[in-house]
Amino acid sequence: MTFEMITALMVFALVSSITPGPNNLMLMSSGATFGIKRTLPHLMGVALGFSFMLLMVGVGVVQLFNMWPSSYLILKVFSVIYLLYLAYKIANSSKASEHDASGTPMTFMQAVLFQWVNPKAWTMALTAVSVYAPDKAILTIVYVSFIFFLMNLPSVSLWAMMGHKLRRLLEEPKTLLLFNRIMALLLVISLIPVLIPV
């Protein structure tokens, strides 16, 4: 890859990773609700899970969609239903104690698996592979995946930390509930491009 291509890839990875989407909104809500320590597995699951997904898309998962185009529609429907379910769970979360055993932040593996039903993650992965690894060479795909990890980890960490910093303002369960309902609404709004393609 040329220097210009690497620079363009880094900018694309940073912008697509740091802008609002299901992962970032959920991490912000988790940071506010559970604190940064309990959100770390979720955070690492997003960063590593997306890089792994990008790698798998690059080495051939996308060919399944080419062979069975209806499978992409099925994935899209399942993704929307699952995100609406997660929005419902976020909207009804009002416990802000890091030591509250009744709260259950997303686990590392749940966050890894979530990437496969995240419409924004699919868009990012398909774009990254088609634009920055058109030759489908395994070394190029590994490189693209690694650069995405380097850009994605600080980006998603920022969202979790922003949520964590808001904890003091959200100590009252009613205030936290309102915040989480706003996050849930934004999560639902983030589905509009999936439901109504431009």
Image (cartoon, grey):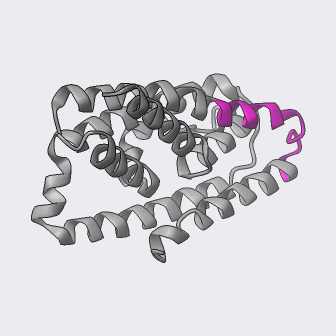
Say which of 136 and 73 sits in front.
136
Say which of 181 and 155 sits in front.
155
Count of numbered circles on the image: 0
Where 97 falls versus 85 (above or below)?
above
Question: In the image, residue 8 lies at what x, y percent?
Answer: 46, 37
Specify whether residue 94 is in view: yes
Which residue is drawn at the image coordinates 40% and 25% (left, top)?
3
Say which of 37 and 142 sits in front.
142
The residue segment tinted magenta is 158-174
Specify whether residue 108 is in view: no
Res 65 quadrant in image:
bottom left
Question: In the image, residue 163 lies at what x, y percent?
Answer: 74, 37
Which residue is drawn at the image coordinates 49% and 60% (left, top)?
83
Question: In the image, residue 69 lies at what x, y percent?
Answer: 18, 69
Which residue is drawn at the image coordinates 48% and 75% (left, top)?
198
Question: In the image, residue 134 lies at what x, y percent?
Answer: 23, 44
Reply yes or no: does residue 127 show up in magenta: no
Res 129 quadrant in image:
top left
The chief SS type of the magenta part is helix
Which residue is drawn at the image coordinates 63% and 39% (left, top)?
103
Question: Does residue 145 appear to the left or right of 160 in the view shown?
Answer: left
Say which of 108 and 138 sits in front.
138
Where 6 falls versus 121 (above or below)?
above
Where 72 falls versus 41 (above or below)?
below
Reply yes or no: does residue 164 show up in magenta: yes
Which quarter of the image is occupied by the N terminus?
A: top left
